[in-house]
Image (tube, grey):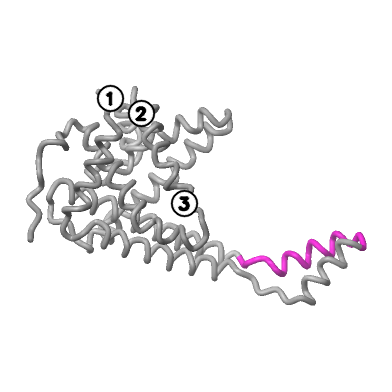
Amino acid sequence: MPQDRNALKSRAREVIATSNPRVLSVGLVYLVLTVVLSTLGARVMSVNISESEAMNYLNYAMNGNYEYALRYAETMTPPPTAYAINALLMFVAAIVGAGFTIFLLNTLRNRQPCFANLLDGFGFWWKLLILDLLQSLLIGLWSLLLIVPGVMAHYRYAQALYILIDDPTKSPVQCLRESKAMMNGHKMELFKLDLSFLGWYLLEMIPYVGYAVQVWSVPYVGMTKALYYETLLGSNVWSYTPDYPA
């Protein structure tokens, strides 16, 4: 059954306004954690290059000493351990992101949502890792055939994370298969929903201002997509009013 994206977005705003704890407050904590993790990752991957070192590299390259230039460039690149640490930090951020999704679903379902939900993803982190790797691999392989197949693959597996969150006993492969079945006939629908947030996505890209925008846009988009998943399950998200604690 087609979903009314304007109604979903309106419902998301209603839930955000009445939630307890506030979706915006938990979203802010989530954003702070991701910024800290990304900053640490950038710091680990950064290489301090002096002006003299940069000039030496340019001189080697301009004089045709490409072998020396290449060797010199290798000395200025981050060590393998830096890449490993950065990958670990990125994965921790992904786990916290899954925790935020858990919080959003708990809020919708009135299942005692709390700030600690942000850490719930660590309970099945290995499955989150496998799911992320498989999903990235599948989307990447389809993208080799051109952009459109890659985009379709992205939306085909868009509900896999929600499915795993709902039942962590399921295997990542099973979640991908169930997402494929769930999204049959709904890929364009979800694409249009994402497209309706294009303005927010563009504002998020503005330096510094983007951080302030995300305080609203990340919870807003996340809640709307959580509602969309609920409607795919057949839940009536329009008539009930969760009994949030005072």
Crowding near pointer 1: few (<14 within 10 Å), some, many (20+)?
few
Q: Circle 3 sits on which residue?
A: 203
The amino acid at mark 2 is: Glu
First reached walking from the N terminus: tag 3 or tag 1:
1
Q: Circle 1 sits on which residue?
A: 2
Crowding near pointer 2: few (<14 within 10 Å), some, many (20+)?
some
Quadrant location of residue 176?
top left
How far separated are the C-alphas under marks 1 and 2?
Answer: 7 Å
The amino acid at mark 1 is: Pro
First reached walking from the N terminus: tag 1 or tag 2:
1
How far separated are the C-alphas under marks 2 and 3?
Answer: 23 Å
Question: For this rendering, which residue is in front, 174 or 161?
Answer: 161
Identify the residue shown where x is 7% and y is 50%.
Answer: 243
First reached walking from the N terminus: tag 2 or tag 3:
2
Q: Position of residue 158 (x, y in %)?
A: 37, 37
Q: Circle 2 sits on which residue?
A: 189
Q: Position of residue 18 (x, y in %)?
A: 16, 53
SS under mark 1: loop
